[in-house]
Image (cartoon, rainbow, N blue to C red):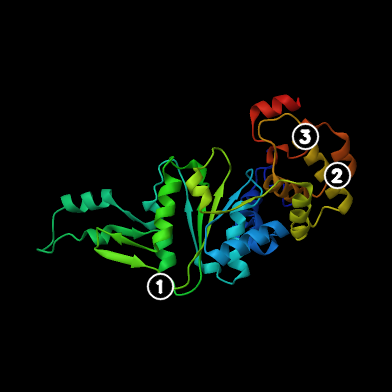
Amino acid sequence: MTTTPFELLVPDDRTPARREALAQRRLPETLSSLRAAAPHFQPDPELVDAVNVALAVGAPLLLTGEPGTGKTQVAYYLAWYFAIEEHVFPLFVRSTTTAEDLLYRFDAVAYLHAANAPQQGDEPLERASFVERGPLWKAYDHQEPSVVLIDEIDKAPRDFPNDLLNVLAQHQFHVPESGLTVGRQGPPPIVLITSNSERRLPEPFLRRCIFHHIRFSPELVRRAVDARFGDFPNLPEVVREAAIERFFELRSRDIRKPPATAELLVWLTVLSARGVVSEGELRDCRLVDLPALSALIKDRDDLQVLR
């Protein structure tokens, strides 16, 4: 039986061929890799200016904007543009992240394990052996330019942003567990910080950063879609245009989590993989009946609003 690559699950056709098809599936690189998507990123003039200002004065660049507008992608775009793709050092912030996590991590659990294990010989246990370099340490060890990404800083504890500035301003730090003083060996890294604006950041922190807000706009969406044109080979222009119009119609509804650019790109990729979507099918159906709506709507209450 002939099927499109999209139709991997067909409940009435459980055959060995399905397993083989699953094993051979290939995911779109630009959706699964920030590095692969970097060449397709299209910065607007305001973002370009903010980047140049931050580079000129050596200050961190703080990017805000709703999720899915490409804030994290900027770090990988800059690495691609300056041909330093191997020198991106990210810190993905969590609610327990501290400023020290940017520098190094001492694995206390592994150290205690080793300390309580039977010892071989008389060699003392070296605490330095349980120190893991953090993103800034890795960047400082490089003789070439690099990018340090601090992603979603608004998730961190309240003191984290101000503690972070002290770390970045000193250009060196001490590691008590090893007795090392780590300093910058090459040019200053590009430091890029993102925030989803879920809470207000401290004023002292904001004063020390170069700020840019990535505003969601039709122009942003169309630049992103045009740059990824090759990811939608089975979507004629009229179908693609109809999909974009329905996407904006979804965003205009009173829903808690409106889809952003990232969701639109995933949706267009899915529609292209299906290969059977017509302009009329997209324009004439209710929003709740849009094909592959699960790529756009991620909240149960939002589904109820559309119904």
Gap between marks 3 and 2, in whole Å?
15 Å
| Disc on res. 300 | none
Q: Residue furthest left?
A: 122
Residue in the image at 67% along x and 48% along y: 262
Mark 3 touches mark 2? (CB < 8 Å) = no
Amino acid type of the residue that numbered disc 2 sits on in the rendered structure: Ala
- The residue mark sitting in front, 1 or 2, is 1
Amino acid marked by disc 3: Ser
**Mark 1 Cα-neighbour bin, 10 Å: few <14, some 14–19, many ≥20:** some
Q: Where in the figure is residue 57, as x and y percent of width and height?
A: 54, 64
**Is 36 left or right of 218, judged from the image as shown?**
left
Q: Residue at x 39, y 50 (%)?
A: 99
Kindly identify which residue carries mark 3: 252
Q: Quadrant of residue 227?
A: bottom right
Circle 3: is it few (<14), some (14-19), or many (20+) Cα within 10 Å? few
Q: Report, in whole angstroms, how far the alpha carbon at label 1 lies from the one at label 3.
A: 50 Å
Real-space CA distance between mark 1 and mark 2, rounded to the nearest whole angstrom: 53 Å
